[in-house]
Image (cartoon, rainbow, N blue to C red):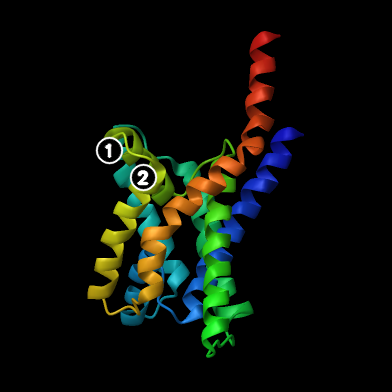
Amino acid sequence: MKYLYLFIIYLIGLIVSSLGLALIIRSGLGVGPGDSIAVGLSMHTPITVGTVMIIAFVILLLVNAKLEKKRPQYESLLPIIVRGTSLDYFLYGWLSDASYEAWYSQWGIFTLGLLATAVGIAVYLRTPFSRIPLDHFMMILDQKTKQSKSTSRIFIESGMALIGFLLGAPVGIGTLIVALGLGPVIQWAYQLSRPIASIWTESERKKRES
């Protein structure tokens, strides 16, 4: 039963992070670095942002396997599909007609999106289930470079922002804020979400002791 609760928390974290990404995109202040690549590619192709992300994540899944010298984590296809489809739902469904022209509404939506993205990522990372390849890549980078999650996130996001800019995506002040600020906010939310991890770590400890 505990794993059912954790799986529900896991899905909620993924969906909340997708909502956060969609809010950042709709704020008009500039898309997030990772999203900038997907948005840029979707501008040059007939496919949606979420579909581009799914394709990119599958490629990154194979890259991660190469870096770790392990088999590809095909179980990561679940969060990949959930992230891509839920992002498209928010972008082209629930938020399709959303328009924020006043500066205070733009910054309000952007801030909400940043917090939702960070909290969603932190929450689902605290569960024992498979990760989205980008977040797994960040943790691989942590291990190989001995850097914190925030440092790795800043490094990754900055590089993706440059690629997105070259693709013609709407890169702005919001992009810079996400690149520099999302990592520390994830780190903060990750610490606050420690009780989620205790649900399954305590269960595993009791199994070993029994």
Rendering quarter of residue 42: bottom left
Pick the front one: 161 or 82: 161
Which residue in the structure is indicated by mark 1?
Answer: 67
| The N terminus - image quarter | top right
Vertical position of residue 50 compared to residue 98: above or below: above
Q: Identify the residue at horizontal 34%, vertical 47% (top origin).
A: 151
| Residue most extreme to the top | 210
Residue 137's disc is 2
Q: Identify the residue at horizontal 29%, vertical 52% (top origin).
A: 155
Identify the amino acid type marked 1.
Leu
Vertical position of residue 111 compared to residue 137: above or below: below
Q: Earlier in the sequence, mark 2 or mark 1?
A: 1
Identify the amino acid type marked 2.
Phe
Rendering quarter of residue 164: bottom left
Residue 182's disc is none
| Residue most extreme to the left | 166
Give percent across and percent down for residue 170.
Answer: 35, 80
Pick the front one: 66 or 16: 16
Q: CA distance from mark 2 to mark 1?
A: 9 Å
